[in-house]
Amino acid sequence: MTETEKEAVKATAAAGVGAGVGGAGGASVGILELAAAQGTVTGLTAGLAIGVGALAGALVGLAGYGVYRRLMKPKS
């Protein structure tokens, strides 16, 4: 496995972890929306909240990994 492939795997893993965390947060928001709604919020909007949370988490995880890589890069 080349260094480029290893970096791609690490970035994918960071995005996956972020998506899992974001999805859990989105699920919490979606469930709270369903519980608080009086017929105005459907399962679709709860699903959208979960999806948006997962997407946001993936982006934050990927950005965090980029920052980590920059911080750990040897100084030349």
Image (cartoon, grey):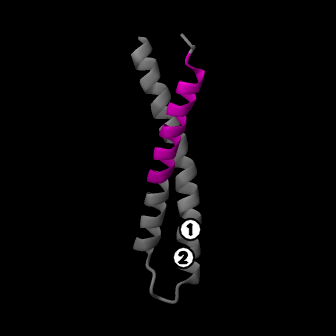
Q: Which residues are magenta?
A: 55-73
The reply to whether the magenta stretch includes residue 24 is: no
Vertically, is 8 above or below 34? Answer: above
Please tell me which residue is depicted at 44% across the width and 86% down the height of the picture: 40
**Residue type, label 2:** Glu
* Quadrant of the snapshot with the N terminus: top left
Q: Nearer the viewer, residue 35 or 71?
A: 71
Where residue 7 sits: x, y (%)? 46, 22
Give the residue pinned by disc 1.
29
Residue 1 visible to an observer of this rendering = no
Give the residue pinned by disc 2.
33
Dot 2 lies on which element? helix
Vertically, is 5 above or below 30? Answer: above
Please tell me which residue is depicted at 44% across the width and 52% down the height of the picture: 55
Q: Which mark is residue 43?
A: none
Dot 1 lies on which element? helix
The reply to whether the magenta stretch includes residue 57 is: yes
Specify the quadrant of the image occupied by residue 52. Answer: bottom left
Chief secondary structure of the magenta span?
helix
Where residue 71 sits: x, y (%)? 58, 26
* Direction bottom: furthest residue: 38
Residue contact between numbered discs 1 and 2, judged by CB atoms under 8 Å:
yes
How packed mark 1 is, by other alpha carbons closer than 10 Å (few <14, some 14-19, many 20 or more), is some
* Direction front: furthest residue: 76
Residue 13 visible to an observer of this rendering = yes
Please tell me which residue is depicted at 57% across the width and 14% down the height of the picture: 74
Q: Nearer the viewer, residue 24 or 68?
A: 68
Q: Nearer the viewer, residue 60 or 6?
A: 60
How far apart in space, not on screen, are marks 1 and 2 (Cα)? 6 Å
**Residue type, label 1:** Val
Please tell me which residue is depicted at 50% across the width and 27% down the height of the picture: 10
